[in-house]
Amino acid sequence: MQDLAIETNRLTRRYDGLPALNRVSIQITSGSRIALLGNNGSGKTTLLTILSTLLQSSEGSATILGYDVAKKSTALRNMIGFIRHQPMLYENFSPVEDLELFAKIYRVSDAREQIRRLLTNVGIWHLRDEAIGTFSRGQKQRLMIAKALLHKPKVLLLDEPEIGLDQSGLRVLDELILMRKEEDSSPITVLAATHREERVDTWATGFVRLERGQIIETTLSENTE
């Protein structure tokens, strides 16, 4: 079997006794680009938030590149890039200030050059000194794409990354993440929740569909007994 980037085993999360995620088991190989499908409330965001280490599971386990997500190790967090459904940005900061702070936390050695390159690539270098609070939803989403890539993660977890993006923004997302051509021998693995099912065939190598917290359809091997 190919190396696994993401693996969950009977992963469960309950709120007030009710399961938002119910015994989900998946295996995603390194370099895969997997679409996470399902209606609102199906468990997509819960799964991504657990994998990002920001939420504890109620039962079961999950690993990313062999690291247990429940332990929230620094090494693991350095391997993950996460675009949340709601942008996590400092509204009073400029893009450069926001990314410089993020780079400091993640100890990005060539931060200044990486920030310039990424803001150019996502098309907002000209806004580098403007307050983020004045940005449109699409501009914030472009900044989140840059932020997710800044520390060169090996796994990208994306929660509705297409929200707010026009056709130009979608091309940026595709070129930098969803249809990215690998620059080296270390492939990036992508797990992306999306409602844009008409686009999935253009970028995904497989999919997982959730309903009421359970897997109901997938191209992956799973065990949900």
Image: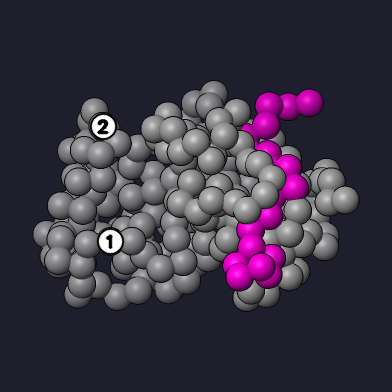
Q: Is residue 2 magenta?
A: yes
Where does the image place residue 78, in percent across and percent down from the top left?
Answer: 40, 35
The total of numbered circles placed on residues is 2
Q: Of the numbered discs in the image, which one, if any, rests on residue 89?
A: 1
Say which of 38 and 52 sits in front: 52
Residue type marked 2: Arg
Q: Secondary structure at mark 1?
A: loop
Q: List the single residue furthest toward the right.
A: 225
Q: Is residue 169 something that shows in the picture?
A: yes
Q: Is residue 204 something that shows in the picture?
A: no
Say which of 50 and 190 sits in front: 50
In the rendered image of this protein, does residue 40 appear above or below residue 180?
below
Residue on which the image places disc 2: 107
Looking at the rendered image, the quarter that the N terminus falls into is top right
In the rendered image of this protein, does residue 78 appear above or below residue 193?
above
Where does the image place residue 206, in percent across and percent down from the top left?
Answer: 73, 50
Seen at 35% across and 74% down, the residue is 137
Instruction: Look at the image and give the residue range highlighted in magenta.
Output: 1-20
Q: Earlier in the sequence, mark 1 or mark 2?
A: 1
Q: Of the numbered discs in the image, which one, if any, rests on residue 114?
A: none
Residue type marked 1: Leu
CA neighbours of label 2 inside 10 A, class few (<14), some (14 to 19), many (20+): few
Asked where in the image residue 153 lies, by quadrant, the reply is top left
Q: Secondary structure at mark 2?
A: loop
Whole-angstrom CA distance, mark 1 to mark 2, is 18 Å
Seen at 88% across and 51% down, the residue is 225
Seen at 31% across and 67% down, the residue is 139
Where does the image place residue 67, in percent across and percent down from the top left?
Answer: 55, 30
